[in-house]
Amino acid sequence: MEFLSHLWLGLQTAATLANLLYCFIGVFLGTAIGVLPGLGPTATIAMLLPVTFVLPPVSALIMLAGIYYGSQYGGSTTSILVNLPGEAASVVTTLDGYQMAKQGRAGAALAASAIGSFFAGTVSTFLIAGFGPPLAAVALKFGPAEFFSLMVLGLVASVVLAQGSLLHAIGMVVLGLLLGLIGTDVNSGTQRFTFGIYELADGIGFVTVAMGMFGLGEIIRNLENEEERSVMVAKITGLWPTREDFKRMVAPILRGTVIGSALGILPGSGSILGSFAAYSIEKKVSKNRAQFGKGAIEGVAAPESANNAGAQTSFIPLLTLGIPSNPVSALMVGAMIIHGIQPGPSVINEQPALFWGMIVSMWIGNLFLLVLNYPLIGMWVRMIMIPYQFLFPGILVFCAIGVFSLKNTEVDIYFMALFGVLGYVFSKLGCEPAPMLLAFILGPLMEEYLRRAMLLSRGDPTVFLRRPISATLLALAVLAMCTVLIPAFSKTREEAFVEGSG
Amino acid sequence: MKRNPKDFWTGLIYIGFGSAAIVIARDYGMGTAVKMGPAYFPTILGGLLIGIGVISAIRSFVIPGAPIGLFAFKGLTLVTVSVLLCGFIVRGAGLAVAIPLLVIVSALASSQFRWRPTLMMAAGLTIFCVLVFIKGLGIPLTIIGPWFGR
């Protein structure tokens, strides 16, 4: 059994004492971040990246992945207890979770979320293990034209799933691609857009951009409506769900897992779309649909399973194709590159221990989370109470020192501030930063693949349409773009985000 | 009369970035489609961005939209200034000066600002960062910098 021997190799890698520890630190920090409102996983991973440089690559990636899915977990805790989604993906959990908490059933809601997430995490771990290798094998046959088209598809998907105006999202992608080109051109050695600034020869670091746009931009935005952040914690009683609760949880968890896993693979969405879709589908098919919005346990179990499943399956395109599907996996791509690993289909063969170790660590991490969430709930609650005015100066300090430590230059701090302003202005204008960050990381790669494809085709641009896989990918991209223009879909898209931004 | 200020200003920003990219890229070699020079891809992207910006700007006169809303100028200024200041002095003055300044200046942006907790937090964060970043990770920064002589 090749499958089992792979998982065994993964277990050997992930279950060393050191890696278990890093996995634990990752999910612990992740939960804390998910709990703290106003601090998202993108900014945190960007902040902690410099710290992970001293670790071996496997440990670093295990820890970073742990932060990501840990934050999904923590986000749901705040959604249920204080009606504040610590994380975008857990917005829908507030609808029924907080109602349950108000009725004194916070324990049951937390349990539903924890059990659902654990189940979804287990299933999606096996999905990655099962689908990863064949997908990577297909991707190994990809030429530059295919990779270029794949990136186009990825960027288009991130545009389609972005919030707000479609046109602006496309603009953000193009702008991101452009900004990604800053620095030395690999082919000619020309310094592009560096304005003679020596530190720009290597380009602007993606961590700098991510910290600026997601960390600083977010802080400035939060300072706008600080007074609204008053917090009322619901009492936690009845920590264990009843037999009836368990019965009602099973089907929503299964459906949520399927929906979340499927949507998580889509570039640009990660876990957010899955939790929204799972909730609305559950609302339509559930026997207890009348209770939705008034504290139905199904309304917690389904989206929570879906967002955890999605958080994990979003690693499939990252690990097999090297294409990030959301800002967090974009940062992981960056982390891999810094550790000297070129993300892509060859990782699975050249670094089997890394690939399988990471996958198994995700399952172990989920186990940690299940154990962590219950006994530590009191601590998380106290953490929610930290007022924001004490939180954000601390975030700024870690951002500033963290970004300095990347290349030991204060120029990066200046650029981070610049991108903070840019991120804030764009968010005021209704342009989402996520597609830009994806494009920023893909920019240089896309140019390289475009160049190679055109070189091989002797300057004939129809090569992208003549090669079947490439043409299919481009057709999918066009199709994705068209769906937005269909009135029915664009309406649901808007509705989902209106609920989401609440 | 512009009816959608968000579309209008976004359009202008895109046109600005796009034109800058094309103008600056004129100094680099264009190359050919077969052998693309360093200016080729940026010029395409710049053109695209200008196109998107123009559409957005034109659309802003046709389709109405929500106003932009007030800018949080106090937060924007204080956060940006505090970070820039930190970058400017971190080498010369050292962490023990840069971090407290960053904390205090940025904390002023909060409407809930009070001196006592802010100072305590500044002290705590400074100690933590010195231990983690200088002692732990060995980042080449000093606690008290060369500006204060030795």
Image: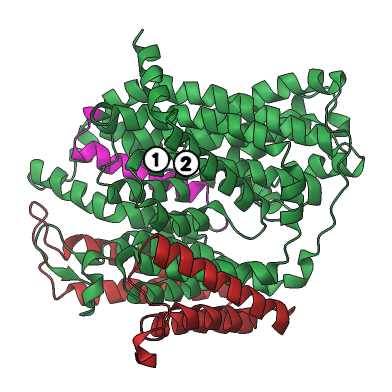
Chain colours: A green, B red
- Does A146 appear in magenta? yes
Give the residues in magenta. Answer: A140-164
Q: Earlier in the sequence, mark 2 or mark 1?
A: 2
Element at label 2:
helix
Q: Quadrant of residue A476?
A: top left
Q: In terms of secondary structure, what is the magenta stretch mainly?
A: helix
Q: Nearer the viewer, residue A231 or A133?
A: A231
Residue B71 in sight: no
**Which residue carries the number 1 mark?**
A59
Position of the C terminus of chain A, as image quadrant, is bottom right
Q: Is A370 placed left or right of A11 in the picture?
A: right
- Which amino acid type is marked by label 1? Ser
What percent of the width, then of the height, locates residue A426? 51, 69
Could you tell me residue B25's position as x and y percent? Answer: 19, 72
Which residue is rendered at x = 36% and y = 81% of the image? B91
Quick check: is A396 in the magenta stretch?
no
Work out whether A329 lies above or below A50.
above
Dividing the picture into quarters, in which one does residue A407 lie?
Answer: bottom left
Q: Nearer the viewer, residue A11 or A308?
A: A11
Residue at 25%, 36% (x, y): give it.
Answer: A146
Amino acid type shown at disc 2 = Tyr
Front residue of A449/A16: it is A16
* The disc label shown at residue B145, or none: none
Task: List the residue tagged with mark 2.
Answer: A22
Left or right: where does residue A479 sit relative to residue A184?
A: right
Residue A450 visible in the picture: yes
> Percent from the top left, x then y, of residue B74?
62, 84
At x 52%, y 60%, the residue is A432
Q: Residue furthest front?
A: B150
